[in-house]
Structures are given as structure tokens and as C-alpha cells.
Image: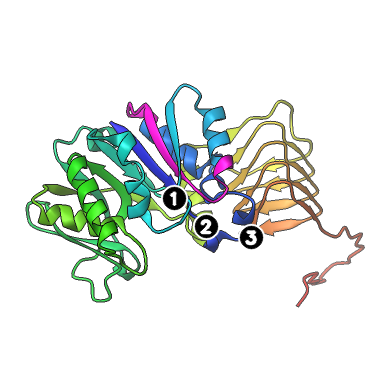
Amino acid sequence: MKAIIPVAGAGTKLRPHTYTQPKALIPLAGKTILSIIVDQLVEAGVKEFIFIIGYLGDKIQDFVEEKYPYLETHFIQQHERMGIGHAILLTRELVKEDEIIVVLGDSICEYDVKEVIESDTSLLAVKRVDDPRDFGVAEINEEGLITKVVEKPQIPKSNMALTGIYRIRETALLFECLDNNFKGNVTSYGEFNLTDALECMIGGGATIRAYKVKNWFDCGKKESLLESNAILLKKMGQSIAADKPFENTIIIPPVSIAAGCDISNSIIGPNVAIGECVTISDSIIKDSIIGSFADLKDIVLTHSLIGSDTEVRGESRSLNIGDNTEIDLGKR
């Protein structure tokens, strides 16, 4: 069993953060998007990983090699981003005919990974969504078999979206379909999509079942990333790696604070994830993600995403206010 994780995308919806940081390394609930995915697979027994890298790929490789030195890892460069189908085709020589699980680098789901890996048929993870037109969509029969998959259908016949987790047993057929689509220039929305190859597999007689995940955490843009951060913090529990007390500071759970942070005269939480070696003073922060080595002072933040190595300064005020007074210090 090999795990394939495509992480070559530029993460344009999360800019400006992804100008200098791969989307997969954006902090989330005290980890990174990528480490949550890898940890799930490792805990289920997967030991060999293939990472398809591109944009800022050296940072992905450095992170994986430092954090997971005990795993057997391979890195394949996708020089041109021509779609997930093209990315998976690049792994053909490494995979050969071994069974695989493909997890897209921004697909965080709550599911029984071991059950998926040990399945005696191929599986595609699905989740019911209100509007499936922006997703790959699976049509499923009464036996739970997938009869058709379509990429971003304008008139969907199903509301079961593909969540980005694909457990494939018939790898030879998958690569044959990917290769034929590439040579025949079979694309959807200008890209070689994995969905088209899966539809080819179904047409070729492959048995593919639907697997319904419990939760699917969207990490595609700032608002959904912060929402996912809050949900995951509640599920994972509070984590504070402090080597000294935080002076005159109130912590409102759930929060995650990495090692080496210096926090004073502040209120932190709820739903805040703070990276390593962050300095915070005289501030109030809630519902936010703060990157490593950030320096925040005299600031009130809510629903904010602050990148690594940033400095944010607010204003300090001295007030002498009598009874029955209302003051708004915000700028209109």
C-alpha cells in the first residue's frame, strides 16, 4: 500500500499567505494541513508516501523529511500543473501495480482510515453537499456502488461530492485510463482530471464503492479555514506547549499554542491556533490562526489569519472615563 499526496497547487484562494508558504503547510489546529493528513495515514499503518510537489515544493520536502524521517518517502516534481489526473500519472513508475490511497493535499476528513485501506474493493470517499456543482460528483446505486462520476456537473444528478480520498485496488487499469486520457487530450475544465480516469475505470468494469466520511473540513479559503480550525480544535482538545507561565494572561479554550511562545497581558481564545516562537503582548485574540515567529502588540484580532514572521502593532490609549459614558474607538 502506497499513499499518494498531490501538493503541487499554488493555493491562490489563500493568498497572500501562499505567496511564501505552500497551502499544505498552512497551520491548522496546532498542526499543518499536511501533517494532519499524513498522521492519519501513518496511524493506520501506511509507511510509504509519494508526494507530488511543484509550487514551493522544496518547503514541502524539507518539512516532510524533518518531521517524518522514519517514513519511506518519494518526491515527484510536477513542472506543469495540468490537473490531478496528470499528477497521479507521474507516479506510475514508482507505484507499478501496488494498491494505492490518494489523498489530496487539502482534503482533511474524519473517517476510519484503516477501514478504507483494508477494503476489498476500490473506494471513493463522498459527502453530501448542498450545491455539488463545484465538485466531482458520484452517482451511487442502491448497493452503494458508484455507477458514474462527473467533474463539476452543471446539472448534477447526485449531491454526493467526492472529498478527495481515493482508495484504488486496480492500479493498472487506473494508469491505463490516465495514460489514454492524456494521449487523447481528454480534459475537463482545461485539466486532466482524476474524475475522468475514474469514470473510465467504471466503464472498464472496475468495482468502486462509495464511502461516506463523517466530516469534511474545507481548507480552501480563509473563512472556511478558520471555521475548520475551530471545529478541529474542539475535537483535538487544547494543547499548550509552554515552558513558562504566560504573565497576566487569560486563556479561553479551545486553543493550541506551540512551543517557545511569549505571551503577556493578553486574552487568547477561544478557537485560536498559535505557531512556534510567537510573541504577543497587550492583545486580545479570538477565532484566529497565528503563524510561527509572529510578533503582535496592542492589537485586537478576530477571524484573522496572520502569516509567519509578521509584525502587527496597534495603538495604546490612556483613558479617564466617567460614569454613563459610551465611547467607540473604532474607525468608521
Q: Secondary structure at mark 1?
A: loop
Amino acid residing under circle 2: Gly
The spot of residue 33 in percent (x, y) is 49, 44
The spot of residue 309 in percent (x, y) is 73, 46
| First in residue order: circle 1 vs circle 2 | 2
Residue topped by disc 2: 11
Q: Is residue 46 magenta?
A: yes
In the image, residue 269 above or below residue 16:
above
**Which region shows up in magenta?**
42-59
Residue in view at x 57 percent, y 34 percent: 62
Crowd around label 3: few <14 · some 14–19 · many ≥20 (10 Å): few
Residue at the top extreme, as displayed: 70
Going by the image, does 292 lie left or right of 171?
Answer: right
Residue at the front extreme, as displayed: 183
Going by the image, does 206 lie left or right of 284?
Answer: left
In the image, residue 109 above or below residue 63:
below
Q: For residue 106, which numbered disc appears in the image?
A: 1
Q: For residue 16, which numbered disc appears in the image?
A: 3
Crowd around label 1: few <14 · some 14–19 · many ≥20 (10 Å): many
Q: Nearer the viewer, residue 253 or 229?
A: 229
